[in-house]
């Protein structure tokens, strides 16, 4: 029995209420409290249950040294730490400071490349969560007000 256009429309109309519910169940959990936090420590507590970080030279941050006000900064983070579970990017001078958080499967390569908006000059901090704890690295960036770079 061939599938007609009438049967297709009837199936879509019948299933559409269920299709509207489907995306809500597939959306990733969003840590709203972490993104609403106005300081770094509360954001890390919500994300990881801990805010104690150890500096690590095994985290590499590449970013623009200077950007013009209103532009976004290109940021790349990679690490040679083992058992990486997530990488979070924070900007101390932004409100809220948590800019992004990326979660990794055990087989994934811990590498992130994104763009960030900055309110003013300051520090971009990468926090890497591994099975062994929280590690961080930070780099400075300068936001130039209304001039050419």
Image (cartoon, helix red, strand yellow):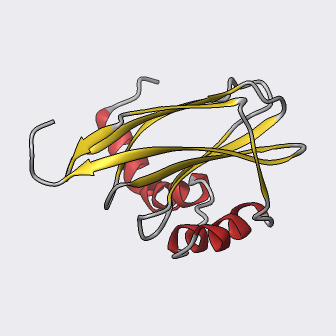
Measuring from the top left, give residue 24's x and y in whole percent.
54, 60
The residue that appears at 34% across and 31% down in the rendered structure is: 4
Q: Is residue 127 left or right of residue 120?
A: right
Q: Is residue 79 above or below residue 91?
A: above
Measuring from the top left, give residue 144's x and y in whole percent.
21, 49
Q: Is residue 24 above or below residue 123?
A: below
Count of marks, rendered view: 0
Measuring from the top left, give residue 1's x and y in whole percent.
47, 24
Q: Is residue 22 left or right of residue 128?
A: left
Q: Is residue 64 above or below residue 147?
A: above
Taking the view exactly as shown, the residue that stands out farthest to the left is 147
Q: Nearer the viewer, residue 23 or 57?
A: 57
Q: Nearer the viewer, residue 92 or 43?
A: 92
The residue that appears at 39% across and 48% down in the rendered structure is: 12
The residue that appears at 52% across and 62% down in the rendered structure is: 21
Q: Is residue 119 left or right of residue 92?
A: left
Q: Is residue 89 above or below residue 1?
A: below
Screen quadrant of the C terminus: top left
The residue that appears at 45% across and 45% down in the rendered structure is: 140
Measuring from the top left, give residue 35's x and y in whole percent.
53, 67
Asked where in the image residue 16 lies, by quadrant, the reply is bottom left
């Amino acid at each position: 029995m061939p599938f007609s256009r009438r049967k297709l429309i009837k199936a879509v109309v019948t299933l559409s209420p269920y299709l509207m519910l489907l995306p809500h169940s597939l959306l990733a959990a969003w840590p709203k409290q972490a993104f609403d936090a106005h300081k770094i420590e509360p954001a890390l507590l919500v994300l990881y249950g801990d805010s104690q970080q150890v500096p690590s030279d095994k985290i590499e941050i590449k970013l623009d040294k200077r950007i013009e006000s209103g532009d976004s900064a290109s940021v790349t983070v990679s690490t040679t730490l083992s058992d990486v579970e997530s990488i979070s990017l924070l900007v101390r001078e932004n409100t809220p400071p948590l800019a992004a958080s990326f979660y990794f499967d055990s087989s994934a390569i811990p590498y992130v490349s994104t763009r960030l908006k900055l309110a003013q000059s300051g520090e971009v901090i990468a926090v890497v969560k591994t099975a062994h704890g929280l590690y961080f690295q930070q780099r400075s960036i300068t936001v130039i007000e209304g001039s050419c770079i």
